[in-house]
Amino acid sequence: MIFNSLQYLVFFAVVALVTVLFKFRQNQVAFLLFSSCLFYLLSSSYLILCLFFVSLITYFAGQAIYRESSIRWRRFYLAFSVIYALGQLGLFKYSDQLSSILSLFMGAAFGSFANCTILDASCLLMPLGISFYTFQSLSYVFDIYLGRLRPTPSLKEYILFVAFFPQITSGPIVRARDFLHQIGSGGRLSVSASNLKYGITLIGIGLIKKMVIADNLVRFVDPIFADPTNYNSLRIILATIIFAVQLYCDFSGYSDIAIGSVRILGLRYPANFNNPYLALNPSDFWRRWHISLSSFLRDYLYIPLGGNRAGVFRTHLNLLLTMTICGLWHGSSWNFLIWGAYHGFLLSAHRLIFRDLSLARGMDTISKTRYWTALGVLATQYLVSLGWLIFRVNDLNDLIYCLNKFIFWDFLSRLQYPGLVFGFIKETMPFLLLFGFYVALIALYRNEFCSKDWVGMLSSLKLKYWMAYLMAVIFALIWFSPGSGTNYIYSAF
Amino acid sequence: MDETRTNIILILFAAIIMSIIINGLFLHLIVKPYLDESNRVVNIFKLYRTLEDDPQRKIFFIGSSQIEADIDCNLIDKLINGDGKADANMTVQTYNLGYPADTPLRRLTEVASMSECRPGMVIIGLTYYALNDTSFNISSDDLALVSRDIHLDNYSRSLFRTDELELIDMNPVYLDFYRRKFIAPSLLNLFRISETSEQEAAKDFKVQPAFSENLTYDLLLIRINNSRDMLDKYSISPRDNNQKLALNQTLRLLHSKGISVVIINMPLHPLLLEKISDDTRRNYFSLLNSTNSSYYDYERRYGPQCFSDLTHLNCLGRKEFSEDMAKLILECAAL
């Protein structure tokens, strides 16, 4: 059941309606848990067992860590739950690699036995949202271990935290301390007028991002990356930029629907995106892109590794390691690994230039001017786009070709139109117009654009204007969505 | 209006209902007339409905763009009806139902409606690529837009892929949703003062504008030497495929309704004929022999001066071919 389907909207409407009919909070929690399990069963059937196992182990490990006074046992419980959760994640996510390694060993030991079907990794289905719920459940045990959270006495509330249907497919990765205190305390869940209006507004924006923008961009991106060697620099750069927009609209569209859905139920999730393509530098980008994952990695990996408190070398090593793991979290493919390491390198290089070596001393005042801001944003987005190129290509040969075309510009070969000047103008005109608009936006209005709460503004419209907004959303969905609904890119992670 | 939960939900429903109503009006007032004007398949089915109650004798030419371009039904009507001297009740009307990239499988969707018109004869223009299973996929529009008019028996259904059957079985609500992709062109169409040549061609079942390319021999030589993909479509294996089965099923259904069927092996440019392998030719004719329908071979009948490109005739070729078709119809009638 994908979020941009009528089934989801009907399912959610029924769940919200029934939830508010219950008089007691505990019944509401039980019903939400039942709905979440049903949602998961419909998507992943028996693989719900994986979710239950990881929930039970982290729940009881959390209780044990909290009760135990011996540091050694606390570490043991933490290690056990982490190894189990990550082991299960690794089994499903890296089963191809594991099976290759296993086959290699088996082949060496038993010859033809290596070909037996037990080692066929393709028969392992990936449980829905495994990366997301694993990280959520780990945040719970880590927070208890670090003394930031008391374990919840209610197993029901804890499983709901792990399995809550709006966030299960692609996040955002919610922290236990943010969720459990909302669900476990206070009065019964209710749908207030303001939350309802805000939630519907946000869901509308999410649907537009996904169905009108992202789904329509697929046809420009996929053919080029299917065989990029047929295209010149302009096409490669355009396809990369369009993919960046597609990915953003796809993923943030999903997050908007998830956040909007829980908002209707009276719960609040923090934003997962904050204008990432207006970021001033790589570090700023990661404060704006997939915020729930980057803050998870910062709090539960980068800082425990020593963060920036263990010397310059360790700081850079920690950055590199954290981002490489971030890449690996996306999948076992080599391009995610390179992509993660590349971002680690960007963060490290940015830190080195602007902090450690102070090479850019005196830039602070200059960099606040509009044009330097625009330059910073453009340079950052060029580097980020290079990362998306690595993220998107299908194999190493394509990557080498695409990087060559992305870095060493060659706009005139393989033109789709006859005549160099005409061909160049015809190919670049729409891009130049959009690019000009983007540069004007960041040069003149970046700060104003970033600081405005657009959803808040829309949801505070008077009802008659808000109805016009809803009709505009519905018309856009009916008229401009390509119809063949595609799944969310991040649901594969 | 106060911002209460009830009012917000009412506004949401009102917005949904109003959007659906406006969208429905838009589809019926703007998109549907646009499709009636500009889509040839929609118009072919419309013609079948019109001709159901028409007592006049009818002959249908069906096939691909070759039929569409090569047949002049006005000329054929004139030749077989003796220039208007025949009794109005005895006249025969011919219809050029050619459709670009047509294949036997796509045409199978029309056979039930075609039979309802009780034509005296159906002339099928066929060439090699039509029996190659990989030559052309059926456009989703050709199935979805006429889904309500398509009636297939179980065997015919089994020849279509699942995704094609989904389009054929599309319910009216989804069909309206499907039609929304024509909103942009139908809006643009509102600003046109006169009909485009495509719109005129979509509704014309007598004679289509001739192919105007008239490529030189040298250019055709370059084209044929550079088009490996095209030549692949002109090869036929001895194995059965859905196009061959669809052709057989079409013939079976038409024969069962007492409609006589003639197959024409369509004219091809001598340059293209040189490239067709003996195996393909053997497989093709062995299939035609097995159909129990009469077929006539016109593929080598016309010289290069009659072609505008490798497959379509020019004005001269069309005139000659149409005259030959008129003679053929008269011969068949005499038999």
Image (cartoon, coloured by chain):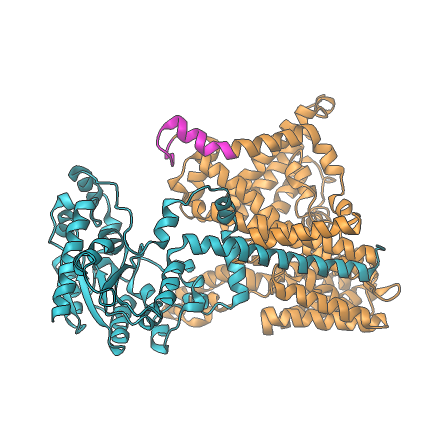
The segment highlighted magenta reads A413-430
Q: Is residue A414 magenta?
A: yes
Q: Is residue A49 magenta?
A: no
**Residue at left offset 75%, top offset 48%:** A465
Q: Position of residue A417 (x, y in %)?
A: 37, 34
**Residue at left offset 38%, top offset 64%:** B45
Query: Up-down: is A325 above or below A237?
Result: below
**Residue at left offset 56%, top offset 50%:** A480
Q: Is residue B22 visible?
A: yes
In the rendered image of the structure, the colour used to display chain B is cyan
Q: Nearer the viewer, residue B74 or A170?
A: B74
Q: Quadrant of the C terminus of chain B?
A: bottom left
Q: Position of residue A360 (x, y in %)?
A: 67, 24
| Residue B206 horizontal side relative to residue A61, left or right | left
Q: Position of residue A66 (x, y in %)?
A: 82, 64
| Residue B166 horizontal side relative to residue A362, left or right | left
Query: Up-down: is A421 above or below A211?
Result: above
In the rendered image of the structure, the colour used to display chain A is orange
Magenta segment's dominant SS is: helix
